[in-house]
Amino acid sequence: MGAYKYLQELWRKKQSEVMQFVLRIRTWEYRQLPVIHRCSRPSRIDKARRLGYRAKQGYVIYRVRIRRGGRKKQAPKGQVYGKLKRVGINQKKPRRNHRAIAESRVGRRVPGLRVLNSYWVAQDATFKFYEIILIDPTHAAIRNDPRINWICQPNKKHRELRGTTSAGVQGRGLRQKGTKGSKNHPSVRAAYLKRNRVKLRRYR
């Protein structure tokens, strides 16, 4: 096995003593840093390379901290004046997964870069930490590389905000194939309109 394969096997055994110690130290370190900050190198080089990262000019890694769990509605004294359906205070869950939210926050922070992919690096009782692979679409090393210059096209701006990154596609339910995913393709909204829109054909 190569070195990356050994690293991959280490990360698969997250409850081993070695990984528990490493993750405990890393989560402490990450908590001391700003919520969104640039990394000098990936924490998981094997995972980053599998997702498209290369140690060359034009590739950037950002790390972001996301608060775990659902959210609580802001309502004075917990009173919601409205229908019973809307009186919930707790158990408010976001529609997107944590990784997609992390990508969108970094994408807004550095709007000149393009989000390629992301991966989990650590978590504790309060936070989850993700690393985001970003690419500079104006760099000559990227524009001249035929394997990655697709991301320089103008329709690839802010993929993370439109749900077209890997985390966004997963959150939209588009990994489901066949009839199971019929209500998700091409999107939930489009599938709903296709079923419910009144079609008044000329000859009917």
Image (spheres, rainbow, N blue to C red):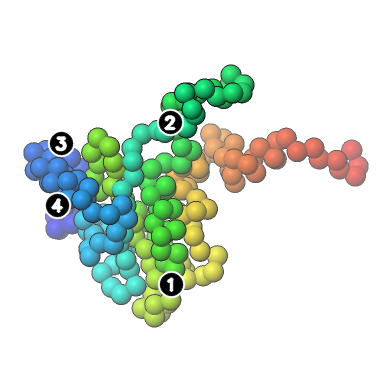
Q: Which residue is drawn at 13% across and 46% down?
A: 25
- From the image, state whether disc 2 or disc 4 is nearer to you: 2
What separation in Å lies between label 3 and label 2 (alpha carbons)? 31 Å
At numbered mark 3, what does the secondary structure look like: helix, strand or loop?
loop
Which quadrant of the view contains residue 1?
Answer: bottom left
**Residue 154 position in % (x across, y down):** 54, 69
Q: In this view, does 145 lie to the left or right of 13?
A: right
Element under disc 2: loop
Mark 3 to mark 4: distance in Å? 16 Å
Which picture quadrant has residue 69?
top left
Q: Name the residue under label 4.
A: 6
Of helix, strand and loop, which one carries label 4?
helix
The tag earlier along the polypeptide, 2 or 4, is 4
Q: Where is residue 125 in the image (x, y as percent from the top left)?
A: 24, 35
Which residue bears the numbered disc 3?
Answer: 15
Give the crowd class for mark 4: few <14, some 14-19, many >=20 residues within 10 Å. few
Discs 2/1, front = 2
How far apart marks 2 and 4 lie (CA) works out to 42 Å
Q: In the depicted view, which residue is nearer to us: 78 or 136?
A: 78
Q: Which of pointers 2 and 1 lies earlier in the amino acid sequence?
A: 2
Residue 136 visible, this angle: yes
